[in-house]
Amino acid sequence: MTEPLVKVSVQGRVGILTLNRPKALNALSNEVIDELAEALRAFDADENIGAMVLAGNERAFAAGADIGAMQGWSYMDVYKQDYLGGNWESLKRIRKPIIAAVSGYALGGGCELAMLCDIIIAADNAKFGQPEIKLGVIPGFGGTQRLPRAVGKAKAMDLVLTARMMDAEEAERAGLVSRVVPADRVIEEAIEAATVIASMSLPSVIMAKECVNMAYESGLDAGLMYERRNFHALFATQDQKEGMAAFVEKRKADFKHK
């Protein structure tokens, strides 16, 4: 049987997805993204899953797109198949939080895929970059759009135009990654963080993610109103009653995700 391009497992309320093209340093393709999108949507629909972890291997989270496959493509080839559209775009519609556990290279599409996740936990050997300019093209899956929002215009322009790589410490200083951990701990740290998130009230987690993304993509006034209305809406949930009662009674909340 053919090995899956994305391996899937479950640990408690955490869904774990592992890119599985080790010989190609987890190079991305429409086929990889199709499998990844299908697995993410399945976890998103599963009431027993509260958060997800996306990982590669110790050498590479994903070292970019599959350049060998696209080398001979024409404009009409990429335009008609909507390359970097389709299921690539559907990933941003996943409602539950996704943590990227990044070891080794996260370059080009790999860096863009990590940025599409909600939290990036980087191994101390991680390298981030957008080297597409060296191939005579530009980033096509958010590198010129999400990267400036994450690290600012100056650093994004530096990375995109020079194609240099940024190590984990610089990425953390720049605000691209949430934390840096030893390489042999990155998966465990990501699962531990996802387990904490998954223990919270799922409606609250989804709304919190939506609100932070609203701040990322909208003006302040619209974002504040969106936040306030979601805050108000959570008073209609059972979990709000349980969470506040548990606080007053000095006990741990027993959320039902309702």
Image (cartoon, helix red, strand yellow):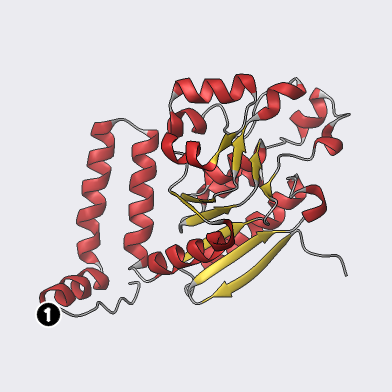
Residue lying at the far left of the rendered structure: 248
Amino acid, disc 1: Glu
Q: Secondary structure at mark 1?
A: loop
Q: Nearer the viewer, residue 170 or 133?
A: 170
On the rendered image, what quadrant is the C terminus found in?
A: bottom left
User: In this image, 79 relative to 39: left or right?
Assistant: right
Q: Is residue 36 above or below residue 174?
A: below
Residue 172 in view: yes
The residue lying at 49 percent from left, 70 percent from top is 49
Q: Is residue 11 above or below residue 182?
A: below
The residue lying at 46 percent from left, 55 percent from top is 95
Residue 55 at x, y = what percent? 61, 57
Which residue bears the numbered disc 1? 249
On the rendered image, what quadrant is the N terminus found in?
A: bottom right
Where, by quadrant of the figure, is residue 151 drawn? top left
The residue lying at 38 percent from left, 57 percent from top is 206
Q: Nearer the viewer, residue 18 or 33?
A: 18
Q: Is residue 241 above or below residue 122?
A: below
Residue 84 at x, y = what percent? 68, 37
Residue 204 at x, y = what percent? 31, 61
Residue 76 at x, y = what percent? 81, 26
Where, by quadrant of the figure, is residue 75 drawn? top right
The residue lying at 86 percent from left, 65 percent from top is 2
User: In this image, 113 relative to 212: left or right?
Assistant: right
Residue 46 in view: no
User: In this image, 175 relative to 104: left or right?
Assistant: left
